[in-house]
Each structure stands twice: as structure tokens, then as C-alpha cells.
Image (tube, rainbow, N blue to C red):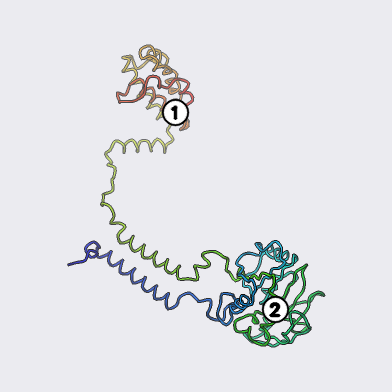
Amino acid sequence: MPSALSVRLAPGDRKILFILAAFCLALAAAALVIGPVNPQEGFGIPSSYSYGPGGARAAYVLLEESGYDVARWEKSPLELPSRGDGTILIFSEPVYTAGEEERQALVRFLRTGGRIVATGGIAASTLLPEGGAISKAVLPGETQSYAALLPSPITRDAGEIELVPESAWAHLESRQLALYGAQSEPVVVTYRVGDGRVVWWAGAWPLTNLGISAKQNLQLFLNSVGPPQGVKVLWDEYFHGERGSLWSYLKATPVPWAGLQLGLFAVAVVATFGRRWGPAMRRRTESRLSPLEFVDTLGALYQRAHAAPPAVRVSLQRFRFLLTRRLGLAASLDAKELGRAASARLGRAAEGVSEALTRAEMAAAQLELDDKTALATVRTLDGYAEALRLTGRPHAAEVSSAPNHKGARNG
């Protein structure tokens, strides 16, 4: 017994459905094999979400377990607290640059007591007031050891650190201290801005999952952040591209792939069954022998030729013919005589007929007549024809609704 699907589907429809089903299966297989790149794999950027060797998940969890009030910051610097005191902002090798307004917001954050720990070389230095770094020619991933240059709360118990120096501080101002590296090319610098403090590293290696355990890198990281009492630590992910939207979360999950497959399945269903819904009906075509075909053709000719006076002339001749036939008068009567006779015999409904005839005769005699005036004139004559029952057609117009001479003039 044939299945219901094989009975209802035409051979062409079955072919379309099978092709799309095969494509969806191939797409699902490709998603499983290839799939989106997992941010926790590979070296990558030092994101607090990443478990890879170049990620910074270990440093983020360490702060949580050490009693710090830490949270990820996925907003613009423009939304930082109005006062920065008691708040620490960590930039771990930012990828994107900041706009001028965002830089000014960071300056306000520092001047009101905030602390910024910026790691990652040139990109990080551009976020800092009076910041500036130059690149250094080093092999990718090549680490170097640096001894502390002077005693400081940041160098306490961190006499030697290991760093991948992506850059060096370009020029030390009088209030800027070089903590590691040579005085000519410092790789860790600190200085005050208002009531706040800046700590800059030439690379993010000391806080990465792989580099945090080398030398005294862990102690350098904790010293740069400071004690946990009474502070809020914000780990920036905004300049890594995480903008805090629902899509930024969903795009790292299988949801987009599932949505694409559902969309393809919906297209397959519509293409297969959509045109089968409802009865099949022939398209209705208007006969070329229909009276409306003649009217449309004639009207299009008048419109194309801008022949407004002839159109008014035809309407006037028709109205005079119907009116004189109704009154039993000669067709040669002028407009005033014909209007007086209509008023005398047909009553109030014929008031203004004389004036309407006069205006129609003047319009028909013009060489250039605009379409708006011509249309108003023809409508006035047709209105009188219906009000006076000259056409013999059923109508709903009452005698009181007949157009008067004022209304005709306004039309």
C-alpha cells in the first residue's frame, strides 16, 4: 500500500524534498565535524572565558576564590561608575580601540580614584592617559625574564617575572616609574592619574593560563590588582568584542546552526506543499469585447493626448441632448433659455443648470484646459443629469442633493 506522502507528492516535489533533506543532513554533519571555533581551544586572546593556554580563565577564577568581588565588564567605558574609587578595571590584551569619548571616560574613572591594570602592549597603552608604547621585534611566544628595578608594592615578593614583551614604554615621564625591564625600554610601568593609578604591562603573559605559574608572575598579578578588601574588580571583555547582548551569547552556541536548519526545513515545506493549499483556480481575464475595455481605451487616449476640451464637449452635447429630449424643446436653444425652461418645468432640482451649461460651453471652447477643471465640469453635468433623472438609471439622489450653482463653481 503506498504511503500518504507518495500519494500526495508529485515526483518533482519529492525530488525537491529529498534534495533539501540531504542538504540539511550534510550541513548538520559539517557543523559537528567543523563547528564554530571553541574560544577555550587554541592560544587565542587572554579572555576570562577561555580555558586555552593563552586564555585568562585561571586568573579570573583565582580572583573569585581569593575573596575578590570580581565581575566581567561587557559595557562601554561610558557606563563605568561615576566615581572610580574602590573599583579596579583590568584590560587583558584588548583587541579593539577606544573612541575619544571612551578615553575621556577612562580619564575620569582614574581621576576619581579608580585603578586600571592594562596588559597587552600598544593596544592597551592607547587606552591610558599619557600612554604610549613602541613595538619590539621578538619571536611570537618567546618569553624573557625580568628582574625588579626597584622596591614597590607591585614588585613585592615578585623579584623576577617572565613576560612576552610585545612592546616597550616609549617615553617615561617624571612621575612614571619603570618597575621591570631596562630604563630605556621598560616593560612594566606604573604612575598616578589624579587619585587613581595605572599599571601597564608590555604583554598579558603573566595572567594567562600558561604563564601565570611561571617565575613570580602570580605575585605580580595579585600585587597589580591590590588587596581584595573593599574593592570591586571589573574584568573587561568589551574590548574583546563581547558587547553584552543576547546575540553575543547565542552566537557561541549551536543555536544559529539550528536556526539555519529549521529555516531550510521551512523553505522545503513551503516549496513542497505551499502551492497545493486551496483550490486551483484559473486567473480571471477581462474580455476585450467588454464595454469597459472600450471605456478604458477611450479614456487612455484622451489622457495621453491631454484632450480635456473635447471630453467636456462630448459631455455637454450628451447633457443638452438628454435635457432637450426630456423637455421636448429644440436643441438650438442657448444656455440661458434652456436653463430657464428646465427651472420652470423641473423645479428646484434644475436651479443652476443655466450657469453650468454656460461654464461647460466656455470650457469646451478653450484651447488649453487643465484636467482638474475639465473633470469638475463633467462631474457637474453628470450630477445634474442624475438629479433631473435624465439618464433613466436608478439612483439614490434626492432633489435636495442636486448640485447648485455655488457648489458647481467650487467644484
Q: Position of residue 184 (x, y in %)?
A: 78, 82
Q: What type is the residue that disc 2 sits on?
A: Trp
Q: Residue furthest top?
A: 344
Relative to residue 115, is residue 210 drawn left or right?
Answer: left
Q: CA distance from mark 2 to mark 1?
A: 84 Å
Q: Secondary structure at mark 1?
A: helix
Relative to residue 147, is residue 14 drawn left or right?
Answer: left
Q: Position of residue 60 (x, y in %)?
A: 61, 76
Label 1: few (<14), some or many (≥20) within 10 Å?
some
Relative to residue 64, is residue 24 drawn left or right?
Answer: left
Q: Quadrant of residue 351?
A: top left
- In front: 313, or 18? 18
Q: Position of residue 228 (x, y in %)?
A: 68, 74
Q: What type is the residue that disc 1 sits on?
A: Ala
- In front: 277, or 406? 277
Q: Position of residue 107 (x, y in %)?
A: 73, 66
Q: In this figure, which residue is indicated by the disc labeled 1? A: 376
- In the rendered structure, which disc, 2 or 1, sits on the residue that comes first in sequence? 2
Q: In this figure, which residue is indicated by the disc labeled 2? A: 201
* Residue 316 position (above or below residue 102): above
* Residue 32 position (above or below residue 17): below
- Identify the residue at image location x=44%, y=28%: 376
* Residue 294 position (above or below residue 199): above
Q: Secondary structure at mark 2?
A: strand
Q: Residue furthest left?
A: 1
Q: Which one is closest to the eye, mark 2 or mark 1? A: 2
